[in-house]
Image (cartoon, rainbow, N blue to C red):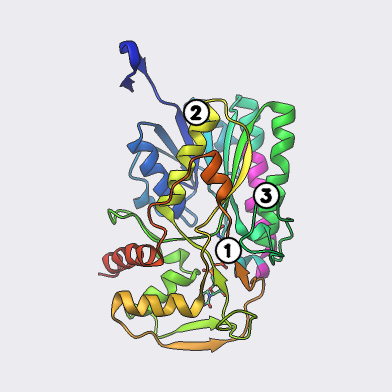
């Protein structure tokens, strides 16, 4: 609630954040609150961390239960939804596809059904660079063919496919964000990646730096890349949060629906990341060379020009040093 022009009391929209107890969702919740939005976090805490729900209302519920979603939407009159709730491990999706299709696709359909019934018309979706599979060109533009090479990417592509039909039939507008490699931590060190999400490279290397892990495995050293290891586009979670607020404001102001890449447009190899961690932490990291990991693409780097142009997205933390530096501050804090 704030005084708008002509002294009118203007109440900013209420936003439902599914998966708001998770890594990206909690950072978006913080920024939405700072911008004056009211928020409701809907989370089953299966992988999220209750301590990350520091702002807005909390509704403990499961997207696998339609009654939970209806109860939440009946209780809170939301104007928009940001849908983060999903499983996000490429490797796990290869070994447990059923779990990924059930949670990332079926449960999203449950959510979309409820939103349609309650007339919620603004949907911001956490998609992924994994929808592209092995890129035919780099940096990858949004018009690149969607050809996932793992079930995780397939689940994200499926949901993206639903959205234009929901817009055409039910007037539900959307923004799909194809995150590249989300990393880093809240610059105020209030939020970061929690232990159970440590399947990703940077937190695992930082775990080795604090001594919680003996070594880091490098999955594949024979890729067709400069040093033989996979190249990824690491993007700061605080910058991802900024893009979500821009998309919300665009949709609420009548902007059109679209899919956007969110990355830095600069790729770093696994070994480059490890070396950067050594430089920033001053710790030596023991590396163990391992075989390739199923589902991995050799290179994945974004073109984010569309988000920069249409949403006026500007990154604050685009240097790998900033990304790893904030993650290291957080890692030291939780390792105490
Ligand atoms: C990065 C690279 C591994 C761990 C992630 C998310 C996915 C999506 C895209 C948002 C790979 C290598 C890793 C280790 C290693 N993000 N690696 N040793 O798989 O690129 O995908 O970003 O939607 O949700 O999973 O990220 O951090 O798991 O792996 O060598 O101990 O590091 O093989 O090449 P990935 P990651």
Instruction: Residue at 31% x, 74% y: name it.
Output: 280
* The label number, if any, that marks residue 105 in the structure image: 3
User: Quick check: 9 left or right of 182?
Assistant: left
Residue identified by numbered label 2:
78
User: Does residue 168 sit above or below 217 in this rendering?
Assistant: above
- Foreground pick, 84 / 145: 145
Residue 327, position in %: x, y? 35, 64
Instruction: Residue at 47% x, 64% y: name it.
Output: 197
Residue 42, position in %: x, y? 48, 41
Label 3, label 1: how far apart the Cα atoms are: 25 Å
Q: Main secondary structure of the magenta part?
A: helix
Can see residue 56?
A: no
Can see residue 224?
A: yes
User: Quick check: 207 left or right of 166?
Assistant: left
Q: Earlier in the sequence, mark 3 or mark 1?
A: 3
2 vs 1, front mark:
1
């Amino acid at each position: 609630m704030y005084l708008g022009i002509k002294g009118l009391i203007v109440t900013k929209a209420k936003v439902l954040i599914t998966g708001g107890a998770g890594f990206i969702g909690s950072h978006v919740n913080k920024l939405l609150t700072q911008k004056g939005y009211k928020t409701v976090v809907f989370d089953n805490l299966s992988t999220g961390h209750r301590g990350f729900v520091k702002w807005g209302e909390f509704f403990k519920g499961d997207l696998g239960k339609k009654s939970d979603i209806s109860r939440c939407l009946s209780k809170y009159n939301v104007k928009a939804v940001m849908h983060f709730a999903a499983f996000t491990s490429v490797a796990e999706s290869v070994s447990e596809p059923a779990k990924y299709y059930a949670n990332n696709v079926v449960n999203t359909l449950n959510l979309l059904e409820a939103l349609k019934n309650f007339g919620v018309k603004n949907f911001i979706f956490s998609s992924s660079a994994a929808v592209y599979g092995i890129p035919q060109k780099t940096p990858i533009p949004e018009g690149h063919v969607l050809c996932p090479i793992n079930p995780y990417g397939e689940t994200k592509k499926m949901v993206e496919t639903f959205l234009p039909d929901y817009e055409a039939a039910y007037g539900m507008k959307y923004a799909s964000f194809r995150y590249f490699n989300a990393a880093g931590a809240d610059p105020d060190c209030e939020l970061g990646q929690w232990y159970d999400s440590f399947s990703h490279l940077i937190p695992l290397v930082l775990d080795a730096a604090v001594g919680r892990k003996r070594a880091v495995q490098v999955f594949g050293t024979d890729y067709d890349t400069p040093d033989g290891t996979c190249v990824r586009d690491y993007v700061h979670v605080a910058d991802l949060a900024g893009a979500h607020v821009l998309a919300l404001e665009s949709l609420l102001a009548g902007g059109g629906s679209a899919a956007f890449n969110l990355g830095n447009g600069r790729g770093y190899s696994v070994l480059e990341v490890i070396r950067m961690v050594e430089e920033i932490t001053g710790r030596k990291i023991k590396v163990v060379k391992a075989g390739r990991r199923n589902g991995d693409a050799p290179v994945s780097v974004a073109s984010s020009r569309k988000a920069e142009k249409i949403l006026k997205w500007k990154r604050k933390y685009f240097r790998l040093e900033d990304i790893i530096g904030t993650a290291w501050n957080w890692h030291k804090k939780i390792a105490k």
